[in-house]
Image: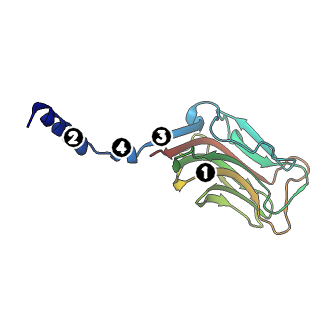
Amino acid sequence: MSRSAAALSLLAAMFVAVPVASAANGTYTVVACDAASGPNRSWFAPPDSGSLFLSRQRCPALGEYDGFGMRSTTLPLKAPQLAGSWWRFDAPAGTSLAALEWAGRYSTGAAGWAARIESSKGTLAGCGPSTRACERKWPHGARPVRHELRDAGWVRVGALCLGATGCRTGDGRTTPFVDASTWYARVTVRDP
C-alpha cells in the first residue's frame, strides 16, 4: 500500500469514528425580558389588536403587570367568540421548538374568557373558560415553569374568547376581564 493510500485510509477511518450526535442534537436558547436582562426582541404581538385588546411591553419587568403582555380593554365592549390576542414566538425556518421556561401571570375575570400558554401542539397551561374568575401568578423573581414543546412550530401567551355568545371586555371603569403578562421567557430551539 502506498503512503498516500495509507493516509487516505487513516483519514477515512477518522471520519467514520467521529460521532454526529452533536449535529442531530443541536439546540440554542432565545431569551426575552428578564431572562435577557433587557427588552423583548424575539416575541411579537399582532400588528393591530383592534379596539378590544391592548398590547404592552415593559422589559425588564419591575412588577407583575410589567413584561410583555396583553389585556382586554376596560371598556364595556363585547368580544365575539374566538376573538383573542397573543404574544407569539415562531420557530425559525428549518427548526422546531423544544422547550419554554416561562414566568408571568394570566387571569380571567368574566365568563367565557380563557387565558393560556399554547403551542402548535396544544394548550400547555391556562385558566378558563368558566363562570368564575381565575388567576395564576408567579411572583416576580420566582423560578420559571418549564414546558416541553415537542417540536412545536410556535408558542404563544394570551387570551381567547370561548363564550358561545361572546365575552365582556371590561367593567367600564378600570378593570379588564382578561390579561396575560410574561416577564421571563427562555425558548429552546432545536436546530438540526
Residue closer to the observer: 191 or 31: 191
Whichever of callouts 4 and 1 sits on the residue coming sooner in the sequence is 4
Residue 157 location, x and y as percent?
66, 50
Question: Distance from label 2 to label 3 (Cα)?
Answer: 31 Å
- Which badge, 1 or 2, is on the more N-terminal residue? 2
Q: Which residue is mark 1?
A: 154
CB within 8 Å, label 3 to label 1: no
Q: Which residue is mark 4?
A: 22
Q: Which mark is residue 28?
A: 3
What amino acid does circle 3 point to?
Answer: Tyr
Circle nearer the viewer, 4 or 3: 4
Element under label 4? helix
Model colouring: rainbow
Say which amino acid is labelled 4.
Answer: Ser
Give the numbered dot on residue 12: 2
Q: Earlier in the sequence, mark 3 or mark 1?
A: 3
Q: Nearer the viewer, mark 2 or mark 3?
A: 2
Quarter of the image where the N terminus is located: top left
Report the mark closest to the observer, 2 or 4: 2
Q: Report if the CB atoms under discs 1 and 2 are less than 8 Å apart.
A: no
Q: Earlier in the sequence, mark 2 or mark 4?
A: 2
Amino acid, disc 2? Ala
Quarter location, residue 132 = bottom right
Judged by depth in the image, the label closer to the viewer, 1 or 2, is: 2
Q: Which mark sits nearer the N-terminus, 2 or 3? A: 2
Instruction: Look at the numbered disc 2 and give the secondary structure of its residue.
Output: helix
Dot 3, crowdedness within 10 Å: few (<14), some or many (≥20)? few
Spatial CA span between label 4 and label 1: 24 Å
